[in-house]
Image (spheres, grey):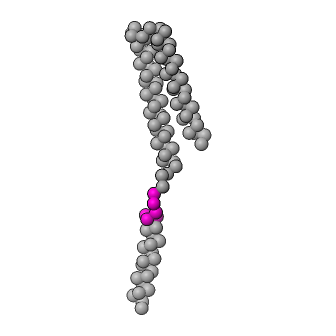
Amino acid sequence: MEILLVIVVLCVAVLVVSAPLRRPRRPDRDSAEALERAELEAAKEAKYREIREAELDHRTGKLSREDWRAVDRQLRAEAIELLRQLDALGES
């Protein structure tokens, strides 16, 4: 009878200890937010790089002043939108 009681106590202990391992994994809100932030940071850096490249193209004569202004205006607007998205993540 004592052996049966020990086995039952061990089974209960194993079930209690392993309960977190048996739960289905839910997507972690923090990790999803961190992933989104990392993607936005990468996009921001890429946009800054595009702006610098457009400036270099203008200085080397590959882009006319008018073309450069149009490209620069568009790239900076996109960069501002990325910054707004990053700010919105920080507020939530």
Please name the residue shown 49% across and 17% down the image: 72
Above-or-below relation of 48 to 3: above
Please name the residue shown 51% across and 25% down the image: 78
Residue 59 placed where, x, y %?
42, 10
Above-or-below relation of 82 to 26: above
Residue 2 placed where, x, y %?
42, 89
Closer-to-camera residue (79/90): 79
Above-or-below relation of 7 to 24: below
User: Residue lying farthest right?
Assistant: 91
Q: How many marks?
A: 0
Q: Quadrant of the C terminus?
A: top right
Q: Quadrant of the N terminus?
A: bottom left
User: What is the quadrant of residue 55 in the picture?
Assistant: top left
User: Residue lying farthest bottom?
Assistant: 1
Q: Which residues are magenta?
A: 20-25
Residue 61 placed where, x, y %?
40, 8
Left or right position of 31 against 90: left
Q: Is residue 11 magenta?
A: no
Please name the residue shown 55% across and 34% down the image: 85
Please name the residue shown 60% across and 40% down the image: 91
Residue 21 placed where, x, y %?
43, 64
